[in-house]
Amino acid sequence: MSKGQSAAPEKVNVALGERAYDIFVGPGLIARAADYLEPVLRRPRTAIITDETVAGLHLPALTQSLDAAGIRHAHLALKPGEQTKCFAELERVTAFLLEQGIERSDMVIALGGGVIGDLTGFAASVLRRGTDFVQIPTTLLSQVDSSVGGKTGINTPHGKNLIGAFHQPRLVLADTGALATLSEREFLAGYAEVVKYGLINDRDFFDWLEANLDAIKQGDAAARTHAIVKSCQAKAAVVAEDEREGGVRALLNLGHTFGHALEAATSYDARRLVHGEAVAIGMVMAFEFSAMLGLCPGQDAGRVKAHLKRAGLPTALGDIPGTLPGAEALVGLMAQDKKVVDGKLTFILARGIGKSFITRDIDTGDLQRFLSEREAA
Ligand SMILES: NC(=O)c1ccc[n+]([C@@H]2O[C@H](COP(=O)([O-])OP(=O)(O)OC[C@H]3O[C@@H](n4cnc5c(N)ncnc54)[C@H](O)[C@@H]3O)[C@@H](O)[C@H]2O)c1
Ligand SMILES: O=C(O)C(=O)C[C@@H](O)[C@H](O)[C@H](O)COP(=O)(O)O
Ligand SMILES: [Zn+2]
């Protein structure tokens, strides 16, 4: 394997027995992708699913690397955006893969953000009842979260990610150089999921993020790599313990019960709200709700909101452009959450920063009151 003069990337392993895989994090990985792919390819051919924006920016580096290694490839570039995570595009992707003659032993590559990763991973999971895939995440969000852990799927009019499968990738290549072309808004959306790991169970990491926010935003390579590697390690540890969300993995859903309802309420329209922004608002709500119930010090809830606000993220319902449905309708949307058991909502609440926990012990009246107060604010 020839990796030229570049420094070795960081490596995080997702310890899942026979389905274990490595996440590599570092600059220039797309241009050297073939070096990492060759050990997992069974024959020298692949199909790449990407979106039109990413295709224009990062596909040439990938195809040049594949060409140099004699790996045949075809690609399909989809419209960018959350609305692409749907049945119609799933049909398009699977039809493309079949037309290309992708066999069960072949490898499919997802090159792009979480939308492409989730959709491609799901397509791979059903293609010929299960085909291997590799994640090459190009957004901060996909590098710290969606490319890791094997949750794949699409949205439906009923709600977020309601159709999908657990299907682990064989390899993740997180090229930190790809972040240079990302818009500030999309970078910050990914930052919300980074903050999530501190809020779940790592107060020291949250302290570090508070101290290093400016360096991360300004593109300091060491600070960004540290934040990405810490996030991948945190996610890998949870996934290794509870791959299919029977228990502790639900903690990774901090902010998402509120957030997914807001995404559905805004019709997955990126002009109004993107996933990471919904999670930022959702995490503030989870902390404020915890504080309202007397579970969490108000000071911690304030600190969470202040940090996300300083980062430049939306933190309240009023930050979402346009009108939102009322509290009752939002609770209705939350009822579609996959964590619902016997019709009861499951929430990730917190006793403080780094002290999140899972609970079903939530009174709908308290929730309605909490949401109505936020609506009015
Ligand atoms: N599977 C999981 O565990 C998991 C975890 C978190 C989020 N998600 C899902 O991920 C999705 C959000 O992912 P996302 O935030 O990456 O959104 P995305 O995939 O829509 O990408 C955001 C935008 O950035 C553009 N883009 C991507 N890479 C770029 C680059 N390097 N330079 C310039 N532009 C680039 C895309 O074209 C798109 O317009 C949501 O659907 C969410 O539900 C899944
Ligand atoms: O990997 C997980 O588990 C997560 O919950 C990560 C979340 O950031 C991600 O948005 C996930 O897709 C949400 O999962 P869902 O099961 O609520 O759809
Ligand atoms: Zn998320």
Image (tube, rainbow, N blue to C red):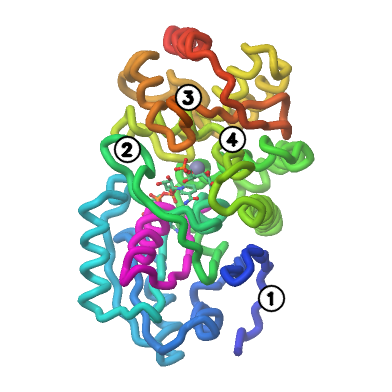
Q: Position of residue 16 (x, y in %)?
A: 62, 64
Q: Position of residue 86 (x, y in %)?
A: 27, 49
- What amino acid type should be assigned to the residue bearing mark 1? Ala
Give the Cα separation between the discs numbered 3 and 2: 25 Å
Ligand 1 within 8 Å of the CB at mark 2: no
Residue at 46% across / 61% down in the picture?
167
Give the Cα separation between the discs numbered 2 and 1: 39 Å
- What amino acid type should be assigned to the residue bearing mark 3? Lys
Q: In the rendered view, does 167 fall on the left or right side of 156?
A: right
The quadrant in which residue 300 appears is top right
Q: Which portion, as a residue range, is magenta?
A: 114-140
Q: Is residue 316 above or below residue 312?
A: above
Residue at 53% across / 13% down in the picture?
363
Ligand 1 within 8 Å of the CB at mark 4: no
N-terminal-most mark, 4 or 1: 1
> As rendered, which of 56 and 99 lies closer to the eye?
99
Check if residue 308 falls in the magenta segment: no
Residue 344 in sight here: yes
> Please, what secondary structure does the residue beneath circle 2 have?
loop
Q: Are marks 2 and 4 in contact (CB under 8 Å)?
A: no
Residue labelled with disc 3: 344
Residue labelled with disc 1: 7
Residue labelled with disc 4: 311
Give the Cα separation between the discs numbered 2 and 4: 23 Å
N-terminal-most mark, 2 or 4: 2
Q: Main secondary structure of the magenta part?
A: helix
Q: In the rendered view, does 225 fall on the left or right side of 138?
A: right
Q: Which one is closest to the eye, mark 2 or mark 1? A: 2
